[in-house]
Image (cartoon, rainbow, N blue to C red):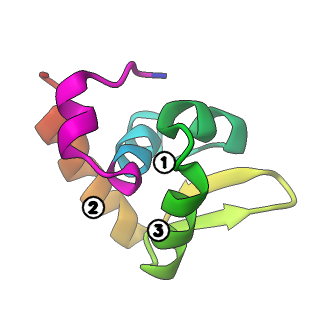
Amino acid sequence: MSRVTEIERQILTSLGRLLKFLAESGGAATQTHCRKAVGSQYYTALHKGTVLGLIVFHPEKKVVELTAKGKKIADCLKECFSNI
């Protein structure tokens, strides 16, 4: 799990932080790990990502996973914010 820098906190939305975290986690992570990475805005980010078709939540496994569309965006965010 990566530490969120101040610049990421100011520039990335909660959805952006969730997508970046999932990209760094290989495309999927448990709900608990996602909540720790995103913070109190986790459920808002989860809802927005699901509505936009960027992520899928598997409630039976409590796993959040990137879709193909979400993976493209998440990889861009990971690349842009990896050296900060």
Name the residue: 26% across, 22% down. Answer: 5
Range covered by the magenta-colored residues: 2-16
Q: In this view, does 73 lie to the left or right of 53?
A: left
Which of the labelled discs sits on residue 27, or is there none?
Answer: 1
Kindly identify the amino acid type of the residue bearing the numbered disc 1.
Gly
Q: Viewed as shown, does residue 20 lie left or right of 41?
A: left
Disc 2 designates what residue? Answer: 72
Q: On the picture, is 64 further left or further right than 73?
A: right
Residue 21 image point, x, y percent: 42, 38
Q: Where's residue 46, x and y in %?
A: 56, 61
Amino acid type at image mark 2: Lys
Quick one: label 2 or label 3, which is nearer the N terminus? 3
Task: Please report contact status of discs 3 and 1: CB closer than 8 Å, yes or no.
Answer: no
Q: Which of marks 1 and 2 is nearer the N terminus?
A: 1
| Element class at badge 2 | helix
- Residue occupying image coordinates x 81% and y 61%: 59
CA–CA distance in space, label 2 to label 3: 13 Å
Specify the label residue 78 is tagged with.
none
Q: How far apart are marks 3 and 1 (CA)?
A: 14 Å
Q: In which quarter of the image is residue 82?
A: top left
Front disc: 2 or 3: 3
Q: Earlier in the sequence, mark 3 or mark 1?
A: 1
State the quadrant of the C terminus. top left
SS assignment for the magenta stretch, majority: helix
Spatial CA span between label 1 and label 2: 11 Å
Q: Mark 3 vs mark 1: give the one in front.
A: 3
